[in-house]
Image: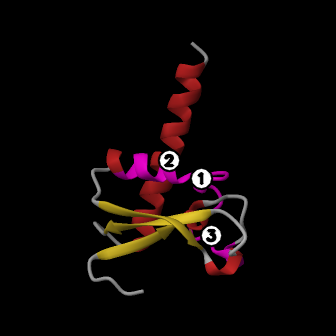
Amino acid sequence: MKLPGKAVVWLVYLDANLPRRLGRKVPRSLAVEAPTLGELVEACKRLKLEFQLRRDARYPRIWWGRRGYIIVDKFASKSKLLKALALEIRRLRSEKTEYGHR
């Protein structure tokens, strides 16, 4: 699906539990375990990205697995966008654990 100025970001692109052949697109060192759509949406909001949510879509290579993707305005190359989203989800999770233990 080609959308000028936009990028499709599936949850599987950021999932550390998946090998690249099943869809992961960021290095495992940046990827997060079992990212959720909620985390992806929150990361987009924090990065001030315009996005559209598609909850019920399934990634073709793992149609039985996790669902959903977002369509987001691209601000850089897709790989830079994915890395920024993965890092933001990592930050979100670290903040949750920090505040959860106080």
Quarter residue 54 falls in:
bottom left
Say which element carries label 1. loop
Residue position for label 2: 39
Q: Residue furthest front?
A: 56
Q: Which quarter of the image is occupied by the N terminus? A: bottom left
Residue 10, image x, y percentages = 52, 68
Quarter residue 46 falls in:
top left
Q: Which quarter of the image is occupied by the C terminus? A: top right
Residue 25, image x, y percentages = 57, 71
Spatial CA distance of label 3 from label 2 is 17 Å
Find out whether residue 32 is within the magenta segment.
yes
Q: Which residues are magenta?
A: 20-44
Q: How is the image coloured?
A: secondary structure
Write the residue at 63% across / 55% down. 29
Of tags 3 and 1, which is closer to the observer? 1
Residue position for label 3: 24
Labels 1 & 2 near each other (Cβ < 8 A) = yes
Quarter residue 16 falls in:
bottom right
Looking at the image, is mark 3 or mark 2 earlier in the sequence? 3
Looking at the image, is mark 3 or mark 1 earlier in the sequence? 3
Q: Establish if 38 lies above or below 5.
A: above
Nearest the eye: 95 or 42: 42
